[in-house]
């Protein structure tokens, strides 16, 4: 049984869960003079410690919904609780100091140094100077900027990507349990964006905060989100589910449109090699017996075996043909080409298989040691399984929310059950 | 060939004329003299045959009294039959003198003190008005070929004034008494002056020297000329103020002029001034104007100034009215 | 901010972006160098002008009238009066215009902005001499404040308009970022908006200062003293020496004040914005 949910940060896989649950209960935002509400009766639960991505077309209200969580926009009606506490009853400024806020263009104050920028919220809360200084350095380090180099620089001296990192550091400085991010990586080039996304995922795996992330880029949503809320006009929830579920079975045409035509390929990014069943093949060390190998190949009717080195790392492929005339396994066979690790995504696996034009590719473990083989059949099987799992997702039309069926490894999730 | 040359010559002549006119006008900055704004008929001044149709350009400086005096000349000589061009209200301090010297104007009333100090460059005035007039007349004639004649009794000179209330409270009526007050109690003798008077040797410093007090001890304030009158009348910050003796506001604000008992301030009697050539060609001008000048006393001119500055009447109207009142002319329209 | 590295399609990433930043920085650095040189040259010019005119004046044969005006004591007094008037005007202008400009950019108050800018416009358009005389007539007093207050009204517009402008050009996303992090509106004003408006305010102040020095030459008309006394005396007496001394000293003072304003702009503005 494969565990498709284990690829990235659900609560169970953080070092600690620091985030809290956010509940939106029938939230409405209506602007004066407009017939239609901007946000029309939205209810959802954002589980603690998860990254939930709001995705949708421009103007659908996703940013408005997110900004109601920290009350930069006040809801017209409805309830919002954060960590069980009613957000609408707390003083808004106080509330916001406990919520990290990261926006496009970073919004760094240009007249303050990087350090002063990062120290904004701790300063507002009233930490002492030493604590702030330590925390500032820690945050800069956390986002990959050397404190000594960047502490006293001004934002205009940084590149766009660096500014965004500082923005994230600033949002995290006071260690808030909740982080709101409004298209934070939208304004940088694609390579930097990819790096920043990886950074965020790494941070999230360490910190376990509840992140609400708004984007119009579905690929970004798939990469980052534990759950994705696809929002339509007036912020109506079209589908609110894990990326696998959405990719496997989009709820309606609009969602399908968002997902795009390459849903299957996208799905392959969601699983890792370690999640799927690997195939064994005969292995031997260089000083092993040629006869044994010949017999193993014959017995298992395998075309190929692997020669491993002293550390069990795969070195060469051997076939019966190779073994026909030799006495020792030294220097026999073809060198191993592509190597996958257990961490690699299934899309990397597909790439490797295509590159080598072979039926299978070797998979290694954390220290490079042989673990097994992966074949194209495994990939196809994986996709079929996903599709089967989510085939019934939309039969119960009264609630498009996540259910226990989504994750076979449901027992490993956070103790709080999500409402059906 | 000849036709084209004639055309060219004509063009050149026209251009030269325009250029010359422009240059002339530009050089003196004056518009060509305008016609008289009002008409007069004879009164005690009867038409003089020798002046019939004689073009006379009359000028004046740019303050009220001078403009009134200018119009007085113009209406008087107009009744005598001359063809008057009006160039009163010439802007700038020395412009009238320049205009006279260069022939843009023929006639104006100039002040003896101004002639003596500003034009002839003497530092010390002559206290006696007649002696001052004669000295100026003689020297300007010899040095510059200008004729002074028909001095008027009025004397538009500097003076210190005070409000009626202050005069009664302090009992100061003369400059000597003022000097005593300054020495005794400077705070009770705050004086408002304008910039020029403050430093001129024929102004406050000279006056202080003549009246034996230290100008530095006096509490002075520098104000704009116009503001001084009102401020002195109010009597709060300015107990005393520098005024011109014939200013209309003295009557209007009920100011009291302090008597220059030591005769320090120069005499500024207006007299007619003309170039020697003009004077010799038209001696009748001086004859016609003599009785007019004689009527110009301090009281008369101060009242005329008041009518213009305080009541807002036109200087030409006021000038003609006065001449009519005195019987010199009659109003003709 | 990140304008130098805004997405330009296929920019290869941080390395090139940093170079772009370097290019923009270089031009800005060249500008700053030019400004620095001007900062050094201007006070020298002031010294030359002042020293030159004083040397010229005192080396001449001055008659008694001129000596009354051109004496060390008198020049010092008048200059000091002029400085005092200028300082008083500037203090009043800043105390009025900066809070007013701040208020008029707060949500809910912006509709009043044109009203007050209009009033300040009247002050600036009306001839200063008219304002002085009108103020005297209204109060029937003379003296220092009768000179200072009308001039302050006259010089109000640049600072008021620049204060408003300074606040208006603050990027709204910064205010959003500030509020989003839990700053109260007042804190955002104090720590984000005001520091970012300061360079504009200082620029307006510099203009105002120079205006004030110039129009303060009229303050003598209401007994507030100042270098205008020399100018008026010289003009009335046709005394070019006094006139030139007064005018050149006034110009030098204006240049000096402009230089101080430039220093303020450079050193009082937030470092990150230079």
Image (tube, coloured by chain):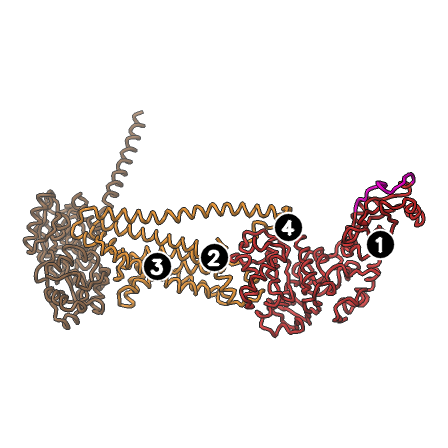
Chain colours: A red, B brown, C orange
- B161 or C72, which lies in front? C72
Which image quarter holds the N terminus of chain A?
bottom right
**Secondary structure beneath disc 2?**
loop
Task: Please tell me whether residue A325 belongs to the stretch shown in magenta.
Answer: yes
Q: CA distance from mark 4 to mark 1?
A: 37 Å
Q: Residue furthest front?
A: A287
Which residue in the protein does label 1 denote? A278
Q: Where does the magenta region start and end?
A: A324-338
Q: Are marks 4 and 1 on the same chain?
A: yes
Label 4 Cα neighbours within 10 Å, binned few <14 / some 14-19 / many ≥20: many
Residue drawn at 83 percent across, 64 percent down: A392
Q: Is residue A345 magenta?
A: no
Which of the 4 image quarters holds residue C206? bottom left
Query: Label 2 neighbourhood size at 10 Å, few (<14), some (14-19), many (20+)?
Result: some
What is the chain letter for disc 2?
Answer: C
Q: Position of residue A231 (x, y in %)?
A: 70, 63
Q: Are marks 2 and 4 in contact (CB under 8 Å)?
A: no
Assess disc 3: are there few (<14), some (14-19) or many (≥20) residues with their C-alpha within 10 Å of its C-alpha.
few
The numbered mark 3 sits on a residue in which chain? C
x and y percentages locating residue C265 in the rendered image = 43, 55
Q: Are marks 3 and 1 on the same chain?
A: no
Q: Marks 1 and 2, how far apart in space? A: 61 Å
> Label 4, on which residue?
A189
Q: Which of pointers 1 and 2 indicates the residue nearer the eye?
A: 1
In which quadrant of the rendered image does the C terminus of chain A lie? bottom right
Instruction: Report the mark closest to the observer, 3 or 2.
Output: 2
Circle 2 residue: C270
Q: What subunit carries mark 4?
A: A
Left or right: where C80 falls relative to B72: right
Image quadrant in which you'd find residue A322: top right
Query: Which numbered disc, 4 or 1, marks the residue closer to the eye?
Result: 1
């Amino acid at each position: 049984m494969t565990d498709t949910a284990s690829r990235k940060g659900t609560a169970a896989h953080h070092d600690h869960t620091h985030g809290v649950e956010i509940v939106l209960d029938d939230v409405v935002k209506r602007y004066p003079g407009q017939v239609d509400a901007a946000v029309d009766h939205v209810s959802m639960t954002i589980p603690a410690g998860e990254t939930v991505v709001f995705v949708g077309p421009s103007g659908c209200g996703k940013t408005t919904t997110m900004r109601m969580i920290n009350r930069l926009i006040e809801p017209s009606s409805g309830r919002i609780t954060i960590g069980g506490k009613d957000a609408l009853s707390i003083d808004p400024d106080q509330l916001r100091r406990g919520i990290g806020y990261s926006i496009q263009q970073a919004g760094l104050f240009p007249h303050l140094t990087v350090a002063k920028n990062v120290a904004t919220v701790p300063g507002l809360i009233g930490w002492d100077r030493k604590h702030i200084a330590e925390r500032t350095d820690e945050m800069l380090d956390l986002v990959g900027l050397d404190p000594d180099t960047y502490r006293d620089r001004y934002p205009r001296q940084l590149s766009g990507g660096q500014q965004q990192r500082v923005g994230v550091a600033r949002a995290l400085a006071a260690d808030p349990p909740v982080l709101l991010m409004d298209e934070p990586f939208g304004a940088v080039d694609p390579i930097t964006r990819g790096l920043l996304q990886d950074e965020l995922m790494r941070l999230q795996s360490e910190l376990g905060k509840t992140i609400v992330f708004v984007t119009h880029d579905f690929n970004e949503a798939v990469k980052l989100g534990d759950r994705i809320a696809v929002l339509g006009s007036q912020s109506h929830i079209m589908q609110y589910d894990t990326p696998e579920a959405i990719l496997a079975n989009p709820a309606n045409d609009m969602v399908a449109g968002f997902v795009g035509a390459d849903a299957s390929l996208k799905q392959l990014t969601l699983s890792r090699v370690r999640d799927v069943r690997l195939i064994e093949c005969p292995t031997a060390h260089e000083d092993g017996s040629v006869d044994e190998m010949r017999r193993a190949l014959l017995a298992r009717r395998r075309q190929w075996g692997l020669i491993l080195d002293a550390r069990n790392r795969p070195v060469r492929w051997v076939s019966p043909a190779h073994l026909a005339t030799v006495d020792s396994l030294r220097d026999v066979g073809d060198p191993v080409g592509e190597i996958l690790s257990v961490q690699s995504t299934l899309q990397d696996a597909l790439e490797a298989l295509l590159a080598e034009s072979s039926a299978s590719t070797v998979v290694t473990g954390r220290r490079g040691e042989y673990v097994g083989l992966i074949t194209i059949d495994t990939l196809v099987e994986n996709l079929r399984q996903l599709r089967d799992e989510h085939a019934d997702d939309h039969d119960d039309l009264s609630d498009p929310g996540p259910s226990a069926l989504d994750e076979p490894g449901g027992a490993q999730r956070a103790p709080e059950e999500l409402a059906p | 060939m000849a036709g084209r040359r004639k055309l060219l010559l004509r063009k050149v002549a026209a251009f030269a004329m325009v250029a010359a006119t422009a240059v002339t006008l530009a050089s003196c900055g004056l518009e060509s003299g305008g016609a008289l704004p009002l008409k007069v008929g004879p009164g005690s001044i009867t038409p003089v045959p020798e002046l019939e149709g004689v073009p006379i350009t009359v000028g004046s400086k740019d303050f009220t009294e001078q403009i009134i005096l200018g119009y007085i000349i113009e209406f008087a000589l107009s009744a005598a039959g001359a063809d008057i061009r009006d160039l009163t209200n010439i802007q700038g301090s020395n412009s009238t003198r320049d205009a006279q010297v260069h022939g843009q104007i023929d006639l104006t009333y100039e002040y003896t003190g101004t002639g003596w100090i500003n034009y002839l460059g003497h530092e010390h005035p002559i206290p006696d008005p007649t002696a001052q007039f004669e000295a100026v007349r003689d020297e300007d004639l010899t040095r510059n070929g200008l004729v002074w004649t028909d001095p008027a009794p009025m004397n538009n000179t500097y003076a210190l004034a005070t409000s009626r209330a202050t005069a009664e409270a302090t009992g100061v009526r003369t400059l000597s008494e003022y000097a005593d007050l300054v020495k005794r109690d400077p705070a009770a003798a705050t004086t408002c002056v304008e910039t020029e008077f403050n430093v001129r040797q024929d102004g406050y410093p000279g006056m202080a020297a003549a009246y034996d007090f230290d100008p530095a001890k006096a509490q002075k304030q520098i104000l704009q000329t116009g503001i001084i009158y009102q401020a002195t009348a109010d009597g709060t910050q300015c107990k005393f103020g520098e005024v011109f003796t014939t200013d209309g506001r003295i009557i209007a604000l009920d100011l009291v002029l302090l008597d220059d008992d030591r005769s320090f301030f120069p005499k500024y009697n207006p007299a007619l001034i003309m170039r020697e050539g003009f004077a010799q060609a038209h001696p009748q001008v001086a004859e016609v104007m003599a009785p007019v000048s004689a009527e110009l006393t301090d009281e008369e001119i101060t009242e005329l100034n008041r009518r213009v500055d305080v009541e807002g009447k036109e200087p030409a109207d006021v000038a003609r009215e006065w001449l009519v009142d005195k019987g010199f002319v009659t109003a003709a329209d | 901010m990140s304008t130098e590295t805004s997405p330009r399609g296929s920019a290869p990433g941080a390395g090139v972006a940093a170079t772009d930043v370097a290019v923009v920085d270089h031009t800005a650095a060249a500008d700053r160098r030019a400004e620095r040189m001007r900062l050094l040259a201007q006070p020298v010019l002031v010294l030359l002008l002042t020293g030159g005119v004083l040397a010229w004046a005192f080396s001449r044969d001055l008659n008694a009238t001129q000596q009354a005006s051109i004496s060390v004591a008198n020049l010092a007094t008048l200059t000091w009066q002029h400085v005092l008037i200028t300082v008083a005007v500037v203090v009043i202008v800043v105390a009025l215009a900066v809070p007013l400009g701040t208020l008029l950019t707060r949500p809910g108050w912006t509709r009043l902005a044109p009203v007050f800018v209009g009033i300040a416009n009247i002050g600036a358009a009306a001839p200063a001499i008219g304002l002085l005389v009108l103020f005297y007539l209204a109060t029937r007093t003379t003296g220092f404040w009768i000179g200072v207050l009308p001039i302050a009204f006259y010089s109000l517009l640049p600072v008021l308009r620049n204060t408003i402008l300074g606040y208006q050009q603050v990027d709204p996303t910064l205010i959003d970022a500030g509020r989003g992090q839990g700053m109260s509106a007042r804190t955002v004003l104090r720590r984000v908006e005001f520091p970012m408006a300061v360079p504009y305010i200082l620029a307006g102040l510099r203009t105002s200062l120079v205006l004030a020095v110039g129009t303060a030459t009229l303050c003598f008309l209401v007994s507030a003293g100042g270098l205008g006394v020399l100018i008026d005396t010289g003009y009335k007496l046709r005394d070019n020496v006094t006139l030139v001394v007064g005018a050149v000293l006034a110009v030098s003072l204006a240049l000096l004040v402009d230089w101080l304003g430039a220093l303020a702009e450079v050193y009082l503005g937030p470092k990150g914005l230079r």
